[in-house]
Image (cartoon, rainbow, N blue to C red):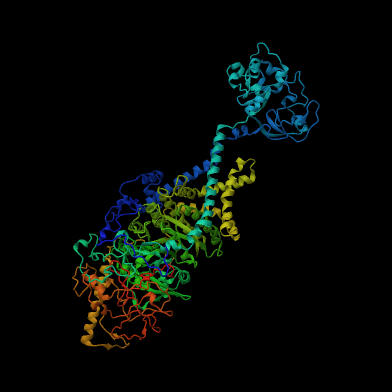
Amino acid sequence: MAFGPGDAIPPPRVLNPAATVRRAKTLTRPERSVAPVPLINPQSAHLPTGTSLSPRAEDQGLDAWRIFSRIVTFWAPDMLLESLGGLNDKHKRQAWREKIALCFIIACMCGIVGFLTVGLQKVLCPETAQVGGRYVSKGSVPNTLGVQGFQMNVTKIPSVPGANFTELLQSPGQDITTLFQRDAASYPSCQGLSFRAAVEDPCAGTQCPLGPLNSSSTLSSLGLVNTSLIVGYDWDQVAALENYFVIDGAVLNMNSYMSLHKLPIPSDDLDAAIRTMLQSTPGGSGRDGTRLFYYRSDIRAAVPCLMERYYAGNIDKIAPGCFVSQLILYAGLIVVLGLVLVRFAMACVFNWFLSERLAGPPDSFALNRHAISPAVLPEGANISIDNTNGTAPWAGPGGTKKLGKPPKGARSLASSTATLVPGSGPEAGAAPIVSLAQIGAELFAVCLVTCYSEGEESLRTTLDSISQTTYADARKLLFVVADGMITGAGEKRSTPDICVSLLEADPRFGNPVPMTYTAVGSGAKAVNRAMVYAGHYTVAGRRTPTIIVVKCGTEEEAATEKKPGNRGKRDSQLILMNFFSHVTYNDRMTPLDFDLFRKIHVLMGVTPDFFEVCLMVDADTKVFPDSLKYLVNCMHHDQMIMGVCGETRIANKRQSWVTAIQVFEYFISHHLAKAFEAVFGGVSCLPGCFSMFRLKARRQTGDDWVPLIIKPEIVKEYSQCEVTTLHQKNLLLLGEDRFLTTILLRTFPNRKMMFLPQARCRTVVPDTFKVLLSQRRRWINSTIHNLMELALVRDTCGTFCFSMQFVVFMDLLGTVVLPIAISLTYMLIVEMILNPPKSFEQAIPLVLLIAVLGLPAILILITTRKVVYVFWMLIYLLALPVWNLILPVYAFWHFDDFSWGETRKVEGEAKGEGHGEGGGSAPIQTVPLRRWEDWERSRLRKIRREERRRREFERMHGSYIGSENRLLTAHSEVFSEYGSDTISVSSSEDQWGAQIGGYNENSAEYPPPPAVLMPQALQSAESIAGADLEAMLEVGFDDKPSPASSRASSTAPRYQLSDRPPNGYSAVARSISPGLQPNTHVISPISPTRPTDAVSSSVGEWKTHAKKRSGGRSISRDPRYGPLGPLDPSSSF
């Protein structure tokens, strides 16, 4: 129900009221009853977190696959592989054996397909059976007559006395053998027999006007042409004809014999048998004399003679082998043509109807419904604060409560610190649900851009395209990850330098310091450091909040490694996935996570809880302006959608012949393959260059959240680094995007992976064959191994042949038999040219080929309405040997090559060097893990400690101005040791200071630069004073109201995204701190010549995230606004 501007807003409903918060309950109930077995290292699935298998646990014992690989490669002992092959490592030898075993299986499958296509017909229906089985039904072809069983075309009407051809042709196909002159010596099969039917002259006493039968000139003079086809009779025709009967399928015309011998011949057993069949046997359904004539040996000896003298044709039948062959042929035609047509039809239906609905804006009914707040932890782990008053979880309608320490029962076993527990009573509960109109049609989206060795032009193109999308800057966050201190081939500056140079840094954060985090790697590579740069990306009047994470490596790594900090694209994705997983679960954070939390909170004005979707884009991709909006609209329409990809087009299509042959391949893989899979909701691969994933989804009931891509099981399996088998390495190391899609579909088989053609992007594809070969080698091998796993998922959409599981199996089969398929295709084309088909059965393979190759051309004209794509299709068809023979065979033979090859090269990198390989067995450096409230408590202690030192310094020494006109004060403390936070709350030292960051985002010294963001975003959300936050984090809850002086202790101005006037930011509640005048221009340390007059968003009464990390207390208490904006759905968000 929609509410008008003057309507009263009903009070929010409380779905899960709770007096206490018990963190041990969080997400212990998975969405499915039984979680799938991990694809990588399933032995460690039930081990405690942090426990790993022994390095050689996988090597102990032999499973069936390893035994099979050794049987196949029995001819290559280890000694031979070491001496000749150079495979000195045990795992490399095993990978080589498994590669040979896989190639052996693929060769067997190709052989089976080739045999079924070509050899089966020759075995079941050999040439002799085909010749004997070429029948034409009697009477079916006009202007034909039968002579000795063969059909003759009558090319002219001869004038022969005693033979009226005009009358004979009125019954096409009838036998006229009795009209030709014949003698007994013309039938060698009759020699030695004494029966009258075998020895007498056939024309004795009868008229034979057409000349000798054994003369070719006779037939040509009569205009008769032999078609080499046998006249076929059915049983009804045999029954209707006088003096006709059948022996072993051969139709015999006995009219000449019966006219010569009208009476029975005594003592002639053959004559008695003939008359028994013609005169004594009922002929209503034809006369079959096979049993009678084969019963006695003397009569059986005369059967060849009868067939030679009186043969008129054959029963129209087919040999059993030929029948089975034809049955298989027609069945294959129906199945293959059906699949092609159904695939084509469903792809058209999706492109015409379904995709348009998904890309459209969400309707008002969907936005007016109430559902769980974005800032609520899943599974009822905390309570919401999003009510019309915007109160914090510790503040009920009566006002702010003084915080006291929680009872012991509120501490969970999984928590390392006290859990904040709201007071009991009716004032304690806050509504966990909001109207989705408060959030609006634009969800908070984080746009992840992973870069490795790209140049400035590629990076700028990608960031420009995302920043200039029609999506509001206030709702999107650019999250750029530079994978190590890398300099791309041909580049003058390193990739991190290029990224940081594109950023307009926020002066509040100063220069970042390296923060540790748990990386994807083994040994010393398991720990990495990264620096977080925060600011805005400005282009064409747009000002997009931006985070740049530069992976710089540990100190030892920076001194010794060529690529310090490099861990691969998967590690870059996991920085984001781990961060949002820790935020969503309120789980323990690394120092990098906490640094990201603080900077995202300040930049966006909301805590990271509010982000629901993540767009993953490669650094060489250009996103179309409306694409981000379309993808988010698709997420709005169906909460069961957990991932969606758009169409990827080629930006350099005319650069070389290599790029030209890829244009149609990209088009058909999206508009035919992915569109068909999207009907089932099971797109098997969301490309890493342009896809959107849902971080968390609301349940159908709307009362709770389901984490998806940030689910711990997903994150843990995706972050595996210890892989030993060839199958696991092909899964994990060659195609991150496909593997991520696979584990999502395995974990959530009832949810959907979609394709949206309205969302488009352009990317740069390989322009040399060497790079294309390397790229497709990775893609093909990754595809095969991932489809092998998806084919085993039983809970996907559909059943039997109409299921996603069957589609995946057919894709897998079609991929591995590509070499034999293209070989048979060209063999078919050559055969059709040399021997054109004469019947429909012979033309069936040609029909299938035309359907497979022609329907995509029709799809092009239907979906794009651009004839130019037909030209690209012709280029693709000319390159079919490359796609279906060269690339697959090369990929199959390199199953044991797990490097990225030539796809991404950096300066000085040798071939085969992978991302983050090695690491040795150095001792693993521990990464501190603490919950957000623990990090925040330490940060507040550090600020208070430094402020106390500053005051002490000024009291003892006074204020002095240095040579650079800078105020001399006490330096910030830095500790290099980790340790447990076991010191008392009142202690003046904090061992976590070094892991917090040497900046204070709440300092009024460096206000934020001006920005152009959406108005009304969080207009009513108000923050809690710093003194309140300190009290909350240190002493807990208390029912007594907080002292009135707590607010007065806030000494710095406060700023929010929605508090700006039309020309920039302005302060909402500004209180002047000592030494800072209201109108003083402060010089930015990043841009010294540019003064900034705006005010920090998080100083003094900043927004906090104690347990519920979002929201605040409203000063105006305007009932028209909630914490996310206007409650009236008709208002513009």
Q: Residue furthest top?
A: 266
Q: Decide if residue 335 is on the left or right side of residue 921.
A: right
Give the camera-side residue of 596 and 104: 596
Give the camera-side residue of 832 and 147: 147
Give the camera-side residue of 643 and 761: 643
How many circles with numbers are drawn on the protein?
0
Q: Decide if residue 168 is on the left or right side of residue 733.
A: right
Residue 1057 appears in the figure: yes
Q: Decide if residue 1007 is on the left or right side of residue 930.
A: right
Give the camera-side residue of 345 and 578: 345
Q: Residue 958, position in %: x, y?
A: 23, 88
Q: What's the residue at 76%, 20% (across, down)?
A: 206
User: Which of the image's four quarters has the N terminus?
Assistant: bottom left
Q: What's the residue at 62%, 41% (across, down)?
A: 840
Q: Quadrant of residue 20 in the image?
A: bottom left
Vertical placement of 1021 versus 290: above or below?
below
Residue 688 appears in the figure: no
User: Which of the image's four quarters has the C terminus?
Assistant: bottom left
Q: Residue 102, position in %: x, y?
A: 43, 48
Q: Residue 986, position in %: x, y?
A: 18, 73
Vertical placement of 859 versus 595: above or below?
above
Q: Residue 821, position in %: x, y?
A: 53, 48
Vertical placement of 828 versus 635: above or below?
above
